[in-house]
Every structure is written in C-alpha cells, then in structure tokens.
Amino acid sequence: MIPGMTGVQLGIFASVFGVGLGVAILLGYIRWRHWNQQLQSWEGFAKTRGWSFMARSGFMYSAGTMEMKGRHAGRSITVETEHRGHGKHFNIFTIVRHGLGNGFPREVTIRPETLGDTVLRLFGNKDEDVGDASLDNALDLRNVTPKARAFLLRAEMRQPLLNLARAFEHFAIQDGVLTVEVIAVPRTTVELYELLKPVRELSDAVRDTSGDTD
C-alpha cells in the first residue's frame, strides 16, 4: 500500500491509472495503424514507379517522416513530409519538388494570386501580366520576358497552370523548379495520385511543348 493512502483511495488511484494507461495504449495503437497505412501506401506507390523510399518513425509512431525520390517525364521529383512548428502550431507538411526541365523559362517566377495581391492591385502595385485574363487573375507572375510570355500563352500550358492554381494554395515555380506545399499527409495511393496529378499534368505539358526532358 502507498504510505498515507487508504484502501479506498488506493483503489481510486489504481482505477484512474488503469484508465489512463488504457487510453495511452489505444492512442498508440491508432497512431501505429495510421503510420503503418501511410508507410505501405507510400512504399507501394514508390515501388510501382521505380522510385526510392525512406521513412523515419517518430515517438509512438505519432509523427514520422517519409520521402520518395524518382523521375517523372525524365526529370527529378521528390515527395517528402516535414514537421514545422511546436505545440498548437505544430503541423506536418507534404512537399513536392519537381524540375520542369530546361525548356521551361527559368527567368520567370510564378506563385498563386492571393487576396493580398488583389488588394495591392487596387493601389497600383501589381504583378506582371501575360495577356490572358484567367492566367493573370490566378497567378502572381514576375520576370515575364517576351520568351516566357509566349511559352505560358501556348494552348498546351494554359489549363495545367490553371489546374495548379486551383489545386494548391501554396506553390512556386522558380528557376525552373516547381515546389508545392500542403498541410496534410496522403494516407492512400489514391490520395497520393490526386496530390501529384496537377504536378504531372504541368510537367507533361512542359515536356510536350518544349520537347525537353532535362
């Protein structure tokens, strides 16, 4: 018996401790199931495409990280998870990086148009335009040279760029590399496929338009 505790108090303590332990074990099991499902999905997705896969488990399987590396349309692609923040502000991001090849104009920088950008337009502080209303409203464009403008206005490029802007709140194309960030981790192969679909569409459009794979 614990010194200073009556039998009744000891029984209550044991009950509370047992419930707490049971909850902890249940949460650990749920985390393990989720982590194992993600591992199998990511590893299987990578294997069917001939990509490499690496994972690091976190404490009690609660917050591990995963990484896939390979090539699509002849160009490097990386899909990985990353931890950011602490406490209530902790999030796990999935980050996609994909080189678009030498055929894509490296001088141009593209990001999604935000509400802040729209407000700045009202005060005369605006980004550059390519002359297509849909693209200009959806994208924040910088360093648009005549060569870049002609490339972006090609029929094959228009819809993939718009789809990218609709699919992701956070992305950037800079120095010929597309980077996408989402606050979520795909758990199934279907979710992975849907995450990468707009990326693949743009990559394929660049390849078909420029004929470049490096």
Image: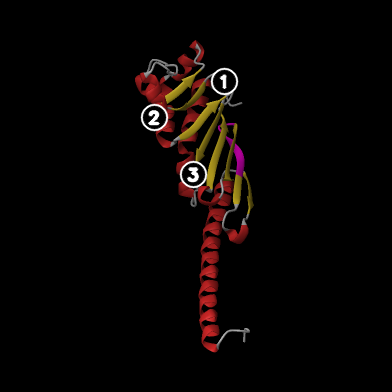
Q: Secondary structure at mark 2?
A: helix
**Displayed quadrant of residue 79:** top right
For label 3, the SS is: loop
Residue type at mark 1: give it. Answer: Arg
Q: Gap in Å between the C-alphas at discs 2 and 3? A: 19 Å
As helix, strand or loop, the secondary structure at mark 1 comes to loop
Does label 3 or label 1 sit earlier along the sequence? 1
The quadrant of the rendering that contains the C terminus is top right
Gap between marks 3 and 1, in whole Å? 27 Å
Q: Could you say which is closer to the camera, residue 55 or residue 143?
A: 143
Q: Which residue is mark 3?
A: 183
The magenta stretch is: 68-74
- Is 96 magenta? The answer is no
Asked if one can make out residue 111 in the rendered structure from this viewpoint, the answer is yes
What residue is rendered at 56% in x and 55% in y?
40
User: Which residue carries the number 2 mark?
Assistant: 115
- Tell me if residue 70 is in the magenta stretch: yes
> Which residue is at a point 50% across and 25% down the rendered structure image?
206
Residue 135 seen in the current view? no
Indicate the position of residue 35 as horizontal and vertical percent values. Answer: 55, 57
Q: Amino acid at mark 2?
A: Leu
First reached walking from the N terminus: tag 1 or tag 2: 1
Which quadrant does the N terminus fall into? Answer: bottom right
Q: Is residue 188 left or right of residue 118?
A: right
**Residue 69: assigned label:** none
